[in-house]
Image (cartoon, grey):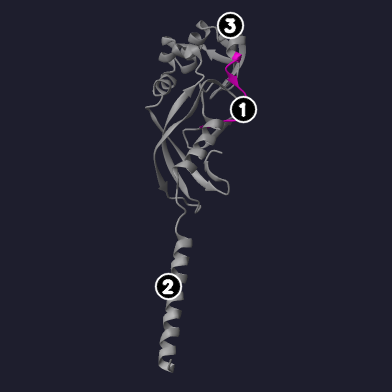
Amino acid sequence: MNTSQNTAQITSITAFFSVCTLLTLCACNNPIDIKDHDLTLGMNQYLEQRGDLCLAKNSWPIDVTQREMQSSARNALQLPVMEKLGLVSSAIITADMRDEDGTHTMTVKRFSLTDTGKKYYLTQEMRSMRADGSTKIDQGDLCVAKLSLDKIVKWEEIKSDDHKRRVQVTYSYKINSAAPWTKDADIQKVFPMVAHILQGENTMQLQETLKMSDHGWIANEL
């Protein structure tokens, strides 16, 4: 082989390795494939820890003022129905109540959990979203059912400011161990969202955002 042929061959080999190196780098920079199986693991973990359907009744006893009764406030409507079902009991007491004008001594109706109601109180960290977007953390709540994954309907990758990969998962769910009293018509009337979620088993779609971590896909809340 003459010199020109050798040079051509070396140039071809160099070009070949340059292309291979470029392809390898491209492959390394491509996003890792997102698989439904991996997202399912993340959703199962999330619902196991955060899938309790609760009533936002975190602190007991709960005092209801005369003003709340007159304005048909949430507790004024919901707690008497729960009392009818034996979940709470009530008593008229005098208590110091704080409002925007300061602290006042007034007569209130105090609702306390009965032994039956205490069976549904779950003591663990509960996270909820405030109106301003901040996270509210409580150490327990009155819970009526447990949600588990039915199926992932769809998912889409979303942008993130912290450069972590995130996907928004749309899913349907199953209801496990619903409290029997949730079938009561009056309970469903005063807790319409709870009734809506219970009735939406296998059909209603919810969403959760998962992020990639060293341990796979996990929910933002975990």
Please provide percent x and percent y for residue 54. 51, 23
Q: CA distance from mark 2 to mark 1?
A: 56 Å
Q: Is residue 78 visible?
A: yes
Q: Looking at the image, is 143 positioned above or below residue 85? A: below
Mark 2, mark 1: which one is toward the viewer?
Answer: 2
Q: Is residue 106 visible?
A: no
Q: Label for residue 92?
A: 3
Magenta span contains residue 52: no
The kind of residue tagged 2 is Val
Q: Are marks 3 and 2 in contact (CB under 8 Å)?
A: no
Mark 3, mark 1: which one is toward the viewer?
Answer: 1
Reading the image, the residue beneath label 2 is 19
Q: Looking at the image, is 215 positioned above or below residue 69? A: below
User: Image quadrant of residue 96?
Assistant: top right
- Report the magenta residues as a range: 118-128
The kind of residue tagged 1 is Gln
Query: Of residues 124 and 92, which is closer to you in this image?
Result: 124
- Circle 3 crowding by C-alpha within 10 Å: few under 14, some 14–19, many from 20: few
User: Image quadrant of residue 89?
Assistant: top right
Query: What residue is at 51 percent from the left and 15 percent from the top?
Result: 179
Reading the image, the residue beneath label 1 is 124
Say whether disc 2 or disc 1 marks the residue closer to the N-terminus: 2
Magenta span contains residue 121: yes
Please provide percent x and percent y for residue 55. 51, 21
Say whether disc 3 or disc 1 marks the residue closer to the N-terminus: 3
Q: CA distance from mark 3 to mark 2?
A: 83 Å
Mark 3, mark 2: which one is toward the viewer?
Answer: 2
